[in-house]
Amino acid sequence: MALTFTVQHRDGAARAGVLTLPHGRVETPVFMPVGTQATVKGLTPDMVRRAGVQIILGNTYHLALRPGDTLVAELGGLHRFMAWDRPILTDSGGFQVFSLATQVKITDRGATFRSHIDGSPLELTPERAVEIQQNLGSDIAMVLDQCPPGAAPDDVIRTAVRRSILWAERCKTHHTRADQSQFAIVQGGTNLALREECARELVAMDFPGYALGGFSVGEGPEAMHAALPACAVLLPDAKPRYLMGVGRPEDLLAGVAAGIDMFDCVMPTRNGRNALAFTDDGPIRLRNAKHRRDTAPVESGCPCDCCTTFSRAYLHHLFAADEMLGPTLLSLHNVSYYLRLMASAREAIRGGRFEAFRAGRLARWEGRSID
């Protein structure tokens, strides 16, 4: 079997477990850094590994366009191609088709669009999404779904739910790779009735894992936090639950509190490239003049190479001089911060004190503006 999952500890709805995949063991709840184009931007695989990353995410849409999934397969698969020997999850590419491609036309057959790179006409069907991911050889492959914007009217969301169910069934039928597990994606926006309908149909298909898609796509964080508990319980208790594309540290803790096991987001590296660091005392901007003579590390006690070696003054200088080392070091710190946050959450769950841990973190973050 390509996947096993065991919930080992519970604290309210929050749970800590172990996910075993062909390329390794993953402790949950887990944050997955995004490696869109077969790289976690700005970081070498060794940096990512030493930071303690257990699993990363790759992108089907981007890798299919460049360098091409068949080429990756010829070169030994995505793990060998990017020199990463731990688990990889690949998304289906559907979100990027809807957000990046031009002139998109969506029918029950699939999505036809023009590449954002060269404008060439392409088609992504459920079957093609499966074939791409099988060529990439990821440990976990996502089904193709339709992700409507958060503010979409109910009739648009209803169509996306119906289509996502149809596409999931076709993905499951077409999937043949025994060492790869396929996760379904529940859509429905913040409409709980549509979420329940979508989950019921997908759970009946008995996928190895389930994701909640269509969050953090325009609705406010309060609406997402309110909907998460009711949405999480729609998913099988004995299978991994994945909240796609979320998000801020406080969003991750809200997801864990609701019973979510897996998260991914570009925020740690994207913000790192833009001189913003996440810390237990809130985010800080290293471009600000106040850091020009600051000899302190970005965050005291952080074990990452950025914090154990360099000062805020040095980081401030790197960004002022437009040196590429600045984004690299701050991306490394931010990824490390997210990993430490999840490790602390796991420890708190095991100790039966997750709500106290979450409340303490939120109290430290609350009211702190970016410096």
Image (cartoon, rainbow, N blue to C red):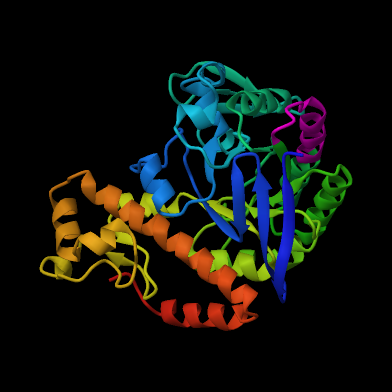
Residue 196 occupies which quadrant of the picture?
bottom right
Q: Looking at the image, which residue is at 57% across and 57% down?
A: 30
Prevailing SS of the magenta stretch: helix
Work out whether residue 68 or residue 200 is closer to the camera in this orientation and state it: 68
Q: Position of residue 339 (x, y in %)?
A: 47, 60
- Seen in the picture, residue 320 relative to 349 is either above or below; the reply is above
Question: What residue appears at the point 33 percent right and 42 percent down from the top-left corner?
Answer: 42
Give the vertical position of 52 relative to 148 (above or below): below
The answer to if 15 sits in the magenta stretch is no
Q: Quadrant location of the C terminus?
A: bottom left
- Image: magenta residue range: 163-180
**Residue 136 relative to residue 84: left or right:** right
Q: Quadrant of residue 165?
A: top right
x then y, percent, for residue 275: 27, 56
236 horizontally vs 28: left or right: right
Q: Where's residue 231, x and y in %?
A: 74, 61
